[in-house]
Image (cartoon, rainbow, N blue to C red):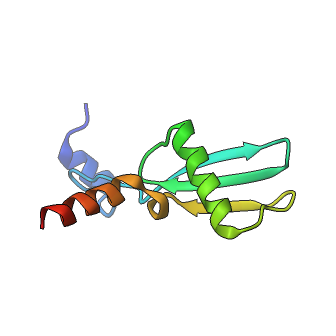
């Protein structure tokens, strides 16, 4: 079919052997239709429902007020990542 040399001829600037595109974050979107709000949680992976709602709850508690109707809130999941906290405390306990 297509060999490597013919692909290089077709696309000399864009051809890369073993080119992997890694995204920084995945958008986990939660739409609250009842209150007309949208929450976008940026994370390295797809989060479970429980993780999503925990992150949203913690973010709203930290803000001290809820969103107005139609507002969109973008949250970084790394801010609320439990695994980093537990890994850090385990590391500190070993030292």
The answer to which image quadrant residue 93 occupies is bottom left
**Residue at the image position 73 percent from the left and 45 percent from the top:** 31
Q: Is residue 85 left or right of residue 33?
A: left
View extreme (front): residue: 93
The answer to which image quadrant residue 92 occupies is bottom left
Along the line of sight, the residue nearer the viewer: 28 or 12? 28
The percent coordinates of residue 7 (x first, y second) are 27, 47
Q: Is residue 43 left or right of residue 19?
A: right
* Above or below for 15 versus 1: below
View extreme (top): residue: 1
**Number of callouts in the render?**
0
**Residue at the image position 82 percent from the left and 42 percent from the top:** 33
Along the line of sight, the residue nearer the viewer: 45 or 78? 78
**Residue at the image position 58 percent from the left and 61 percent from the top:** 75
Image quarter (top left, top right, bottom left or bottom right) of the C terminus: bottom left
The percent coordinates of residue 90 (x first, y second) are 22, 57
The percent coordinates of residue 19 (x first, y second) are 27, 53
View extreme (left): residue: 95
Along the line of sight, the residue nearer the viewer: 56 or 13? 56
Q: Is residue 43 left or right of residue 54?
A: left
Q: Is residue 57 left or right of residue 11?
A: right
Along the line of sight, the residue nearer the viewer: 88 or 29? 88
Image quarter (top left, top right, bottom left or bottom right) of the N terminus: top left
The percent coordinates of residue 81 (x first, y second) are 43, 56
């Amino acid at each position: 079919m297509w060999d490597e040399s013919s692909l290089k001829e077709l696309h000399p600037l864009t051809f890369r052997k073993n080119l992997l595109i890694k995204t920084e974050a995945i958008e986990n979107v939660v739409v609250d239709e009842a209150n007309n709000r949208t929450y976008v949680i940026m994370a390295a992976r797809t989060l479970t429902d429980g993780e999503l709602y925990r992150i949203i709850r913690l973010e709203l508690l930290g803000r001290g007020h809820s969103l107005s109707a139609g507002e969109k809130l973008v949250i970084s999941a790394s801010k609320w990542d439990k695994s980093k906290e537990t890994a850090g405390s385990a590391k500190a306990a070993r030292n």
